[in-house]
Image (cartoon, rainbow, N blue to C red):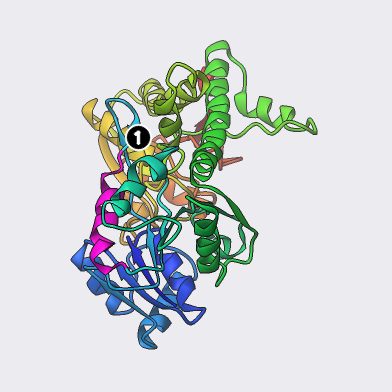
Amino acid sequence: MKICIIGQGYIGLPTAALFTTKDCDVVGVDINEEVVNTLNEGDIHIEEPGLSEVIKKAVENGKYHASLTPEKADAFIITVPTPYISENYSCDLSYVKSACESIIPYLEKGNTVIIESTIAPMSTDEEIKPIFENAGFTIGEDLYLAHCPERVLPGKIMYELVHNHRIIGGITEKCSQKASEVYGQFVEGELMQTEAKTAEMSKCMENTFRDVNIALANELAKICAEIGVNALEVIELANKHPRVNIHTPGPGVGGHCLAIDPYFIYAKAPETAKIIKLSRDTNKSMPDFVVENVEKILNNGKITVLGLSYKGNTGDDRESPSYEIIAKLKDLGYEISDFDPHVKPEGDFSEAIKDSGLILILSDHDEFKELDYNLITEEMENPIIFDTKAILKEVPEDITLYNFGNLYEI
């Protein structure tokens, strides 16, 4: 089977790689010429364990190549971004629609088209299906259309794409069957067939569930800072209850999924989705909360930010709250240096902290869990650490540590 995958990012490229392991011929399409050239040399442009080896082998044996334009194939998979429109929080389908239109000249009867990009409920039925119908295809008879969202964790994508259960949302039952045949080549989890609109809502709701629960933890942190209670200890004790699992608060929510997908549901029913919107507002307020407390700790001077990615041990910095926090601090006149071995491997920790007044931890990379405290005390006159990810348990007595548990002590 030949597979044409539009979009060679964090989802499209690993998906392409896994199809090549099952003897499929894969063309990965991307609009970025530099990305295409890099991939055709057998190198990759993103950080994901296990991916580089598979792509290198696939390029060498001719099972994979990248291209700026689509090619004829048996199945087409769309994995392009879907941002939200800030004016009304609705899903911006422009990239998906453009990708769908780009493959029309290459489609043949009997092909399967799969939308993997996360989209708002009803999008496949109301906005994507007409694109192919207007091109002369009958969905469910000579062209099979489905929405099949991914559910993966950065850093474990290659494993989870294979082993996680997969939602297969066809426009018709036959569409679901055809899409299942495509993914069945490498997916070992259950292929759960349903309608496209149900698949769309399920994907959005998975991320909304997580966003709402994170918002609860973040709101707790704010309340405890206000009334003088250790939020982290509250969470630790509460989670000893057999049916309670409060998340750890943080500097904000990042990534393409949690930071955006809940808006897609809210935009469909704004008068009803009140908890969803309030949770989004709470999580979006966390960069301001971090900055407010930084100002209490340090009036002016240099701040060293540890972590640019939104998720630990990855280089994925999409929608990362770190950038918003950095921008706000710069606007207030602080000098900012940053260090993130996953986003900027060439960085130097010693140089980043030299003459700094505060270390601000914004990512929970393993590298930050065991800092060189001797170096910190050498390079910083009065070492202070503000750990927004609660990854440091103890520090030497000559270093001051703040986290979301003791902000009321500032």
Q: Residue at x 49, y 39 (%)?
A: 204
Where does the magenta region start and end? 92-107
SS for dot 1: loop
20 sits to left or right of 193: left
Q: In the rendered image of this protein, does residue 408 appear above or below residue 268?
A: above
Question: Residue pushed farthest right?
Answer: 242
Front one among 353 and 326: 326
Q: Residue furthest top?
A: 227
The quarter of the picture where residue 28 lies is bottom left
Quadrant housing the N terminus: bottom left
Seen at 27% across and 51% down, the residue is 134
Relative to 78, 335 lies left or right = left
Residue matched to label 1: 357
Q: Is residue 83 magenta?
A: no
Q: Nearer the viewer, residue 315 or 336?
A: 315
**What x and y, as percent, mark residue 234?**
67, 25
Dominant secondary-structure state across the stretch colored magenta? helix
Residue at figure coordinates x 24%, y 60% from the top left: 102
In the depicted view, which residue is nearer to us: 228 or 163? 163
